[in-house]
Image (spheres, rainbow, N blue to C red):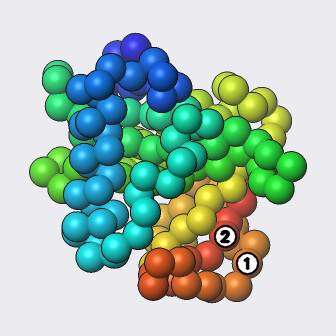
Amino acid sequence: MSAHRAYEVDARRLDELSAVELYELLKLRVDVFVVEQACAYPELDGNDADCLHLRLIDGSALIACARLWRPTPDHLPRIGRVAVSPTHRGKRLGEALMRDAISACEKVYPGEAIEISAQSHLQRFYGSFGFTPISEEYLEDGIPHVDMVRRG
């Protein structure tokens, strides 16, 4: 872990997380994506073991997280499951999380473009990090999304 502002940045594989760390990560994602967004979908989708899990930690509290996918034959490296704890919003942590996620992807996959599946209303936010739309809008779990890419 490395100190960064008022929080620490931690990026690890699933099998490197303790049971408590994994519980906190999954709880934050369920609280945001399933409960807050009222979206019933399989949060435990079988993909976490293949990803790097980026966490922003303040003391002992998980305040934000993202899932970083390695490239596959069908996809570039991807950033997903971007979530900020509801109790820590308004502190520009979403921006910090994206900067740290992009930095982690660039470190692990230098020179590669990065993909995201963005909720449509967040296109401007992701655009501020150099992501541009590469698809038409589509529904994912009932929420409008658009695929975006940031060139390496």
Tell me which amino acid carries mark 1: Ser
> CA gap, disc 2 to disc 1?
5 Å
- Whether residue 92 is visible to the viewer of this picture, yes or no, is no
Residue 117: x %, y % from top left: 59, 65
Decide which of tag 2 and tag 1 comes sooner along the chain.
1
Q: Residue at x 65, y 49 (%)?
A: 78
Query: Which quadrant holds residue 51?
Result: top right
Callout 2: SS: strand
Q: Give the amino acid at mark 2.
A: Asp
Q: Where the C terminus falls, by quadrant?
A: top right
Residue at 70 percent across and 39 percent down: it is: 70
* Other residues around mark 1 within 10 Å, as few (<14) / some (14–19) / many (≥20): few
**Residue 95 location, x and y as percent?**
41, 49
Asked where in the image residue 71 lies, by quadrant, the reply is top right
**Disc 2 + disc 1, Cβ < 8 Å:** yes
Is residue 109 among the parts visible in the rendering?
yes
Residue 107, image x, y percentages = 67, 25
Along the viewing direction, whichever of 15 and 10 lies nearer the viewer: 15
The crowd level at tag 2 (other Cα within 10 Å; few <14, some 14-19, many 20+) is some
Which residue is more in the foreground, 43 or 134?
43
Quadrant of residue 38 within the rendered picture: bottom left
Q: Circle 1 is placed at which residue position?
A: 135
- Reading the image, the residue beneath label 2 is 147
In this view, the residue farthest toward the left is 87
Q: Secondary structure at mark 1?
A: loop
How many numbered dots are placed on residues in this image?
Answer: 2
Looking at the image, residue 102 sits to the left or right of residue 56; the answer is: right
**Quadrant of the image containing the N terminus:** top left
Who's the residue at 34% across and 75% down the image? 39
Q: Residue furthest right?
A: 73
